[in-house]
Image (spheres, grey):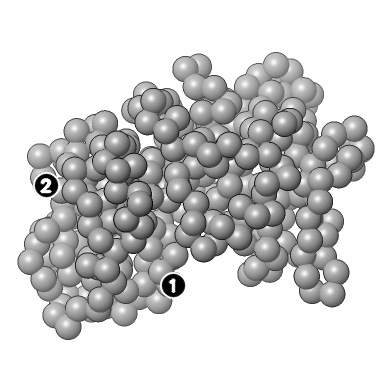
Amino acid sequence: MFRALVLEEADGKVSSSVQELDEASLPDGDVTVAIDYSTLNYKDGMVLRGIGRLVRNYPHIGGIDFAGTVEESEHADYKAGDKVILTGWRVGEAHWGGYSQKARVKGDWLVQLPENMSTRQAMALGTAGFTAMLSVQALEDHGMGVDDGEVLVTGAAGGVGSVAVAVLANLGYSVAASTGREETHEYLGSLGASTIIARSELAEPTKRPLESERWAGCIDSVGGTTLARLLTQMKYRSSVAAVGLAGGSGLETTVIPFLLRGVNLLGIESAMCPPEPRRNAWARLAEQMPMDKLESMITEATLSDLAGLGGDILKGQVKGRVVVDVNA
């Protein structure tokens, strides 16, 4: 038997409760994992609240991330005792996820835990940290260097933003962190941000197709008007890594930044990322994420806390990273 946060649907409404389940109820897969930790992402909040019909079949166990120890394996790459990470692959949506003490998944979806990283640290990073590193790599692959000028991170106090600020600063970049929460300014400074930009500075639509060149690169988790505005401020041949839509999914802009300044708009998708770049990103996180700063981002939670936290993250009220101890 094991404990899990089980989601159930009745009359179009989703409810959750911590329940005892039998291992025979786990879905098909070739690796069974004893989970140590999971985490909370924006998508998890949507699943917990039944928003967007991300889950079609109930009862369901959410949690798009987990880290733990292999108990049983029929997969050639994994054996009992291996420490592993899972992010994405529609786990927590179409397949039972990490808000549980056990999971059964396809071994092809797993990544070996880097040697110098704990399962707790892996979930302090989670999908958000993995996405942040994919974004940094994409910007660097398109020519961004530490001497090019300030790099902007929007939604900086959130999960992706927090990790992005810390990693970029650790790599030597000058980081401008955009946030609408004044109480997070000191927190962002402690992560390495050298400049704080008020959310309102980027929230107003521009009437000009180009503004003064300002940013050497950007990781944007807001989208909408903010993305449209900052595109007009990008430096010549710079890039924006688009990772989220907290400010809206629409994009009302012109082609001028792309044609006259050669700006690149890079879409970052982490859920179905192939195995090799996935392993590379986790290896870089193990090397380049300052673990003392990671610790300062963490809010501890249990399975019982998730119902309330799911609403909080959708309202933008969660700072940094939530680590869920599924055994507490």
Depth check: 34 or 268 in front? 34
Q: Residue at x 49, y 56 (%)?
A: 317
Q: Is residue 72 visible?
A: yes
Image x and y of residue 212, in percent: 7, 66
| Relative to 279, residue 16 above or below | below
Q: Secondary structure at mark 1?
A: loop
Q: Secondary structure at mark 2?
A: loop
Q: Which disc, if any, is residue 58?
A: none
The C terminus sits in image quarter: top right
User: How far from the left and from the top, in percent, is residue 268?
Assistant: 41, 54
Q: Check residue 249 in the rendering and tell me which mark sits there, or answer none.
A: 1
Q: Is residue 171 above or below residue 10?
A: above
Q: Out of 127 and 205, give the one closest to the viewer.
A: 205
* Spot occupied by residue 325 in the image (x, y as percentages of width and height): 66, 33
Q: Residue furthest front?
A: 183
Q: What residue did someone put label 2 on?
A: 149
Which residue appears at 67% of the width and 28% of the height? Answer: 36
Mark 1 crowdedness (10 Å alpha carbons): few <14, some 14-19, many ≥20: few
The quadrant holding residue 119 is: top right
The relative height of residue 217 versus residue 35 in the rendered view (above or below) is below
In the picture as drawn, the residue positioned furthest to the bottom comes out as 207
Which residue does the image show at 29% across and 36% down from the upper left? 190
User: Residue flagged by tag 1: what amino acid is it?
Assistant: Ser
- Where is residue 158? Give x, y as percent: 42, 51
Q: Nearer the viewer, residue 311 or 72?
A: 311
Q: Earlier in the sequence, mark 1 or mark 2?
A: 2
